[in-house]
Amino acid sequence: MRVAIIGCGNMGMAYAKSFLQNNLVKPENMLLVAKSPARQTELEGRQAGRVLLGITQEVGQYDLIIVAVKPQDFSAVARELRDVVQPHQMVLSIMAGIPIARLQQELAHPLIIRAMPNTPALIGLGMTAYAAAEGLTVRQIRQVENLINSTGRAVFLEQENLLDAATAVSGSGPAYFFYIVRAMIEAGRQLGFDEALAAQLVKQTMLGSFHLLNNSEKSLDELIKAVASKGGTTEAALTVFGERDLAGALIGGISAAERRAGELSKG
């Protein structure tokens, strides 16, 4: 497959790197579209594919166009891209908050896939939810999914509106995780550890707990109960969390993120 990437920032380049490392796209079949001469020179130094300055007719020669620009820059990009995109090409958007209908309208092109990755895709451990417009074949969708899977894991959503929920849960999810990790490190610091040691304790605890969860047949409630012996230290902490409705605050925050994603999708 021949792939052109418009928007070669962190996420766009993470995609390029994953495709190349997994031998899904050959360097000679990768086109990176730079927005400035300085960026063009920088990208050429990475040797991740052919580098093109600006959107030209050459973009129309590739099987898949990935649009990874900032959402606020999309309309300007679309005005150039719509003149070169060809009927057979698929367009994959990894921009937040821009629905398929708007992508189709501004690009005057029907074959659109909209995806919501998250930042762990930068290291090949991402979670991406995606939806596809009508008119794409199962083969085409699978081709794109294979590419996305190289950045972690992908899940197909038949209903596009569920991408707002995916944005709130997995797209924004890393920030919630980092927020909790930061609070735990600060708690450790206040309890007498220096920051480096507190960070080590928390990070390894998070890593080990993830692997325990991922390899255990126990439910989350059972895993919690296994740590929280009656009258013990963990129970004391969980009691405070319950009194302050920590779970409710997290659920409420994620719901707020989903509502905001819906607002952004509607413009």
Image (cartoon, helix red, strand yellow):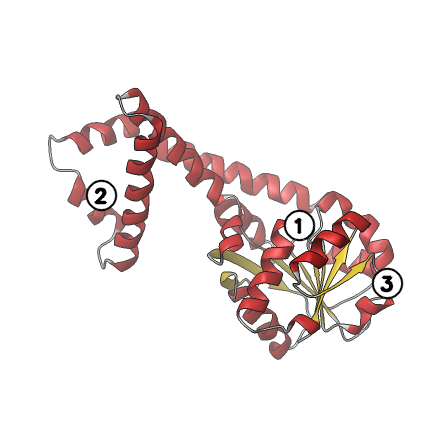
Mark nearer the N terminus (3 vs 1): 1
**Looking at the image, which residue is at 81% across and 60% down?**
107
Identified at 88% across, 63% down, the residue is: 83
Q: Nearer the viewer, residue 258 or 123?
A: 123
The type of residue carrying mark 3 is Thr
The amino acid type, in three-letter code, at marker 2 is Ile
Instruction: Where is residue 120? Give x, y as percent.
Output: 49, 51
One can see residue 261 in this view: yes
Three-letter residue code for mark 1: Gly
| Residue 11 placement (x, y as % from top left) | 61, 52
The residue wearing badge 1 is 9
Q: Which mark is residue 56?
A: 3
Camera-near label (2 vs 3) is 3
Q: Nearer the viewer, residue 153 or 201?
A: 201
Vertical relation: 142 (above or below) 148: below
Label 1 Cα neighbours within 10 Å, binned few <14 / some 14-19 / many ≥20: some
* Label 3 SS: loop
Give coordinates of residue 217: x percent, y percent: 23, 59
Q: Image check: 61 left or right of 116?
A: right
Q: CA distance from mark 2 to mark 3?
A: 56 Å
Q: Secondary structure at mark 1?
A: loop
How far apart marks 2 and 1 lie (CA) works out to 40 Å
Q: Is residue 203 left or right of residue 231?
A: right
Q: Position of residue 252 (x, y in %)?
A: 46, 35
Q: Is residue 196 above or below residue 34?
A: above
Identify the residue under disc 2.
224
Q: Identify the mark nearer the N-term, 2 or 3.
A: 3
- In the picture, the disc for residue 191 is none
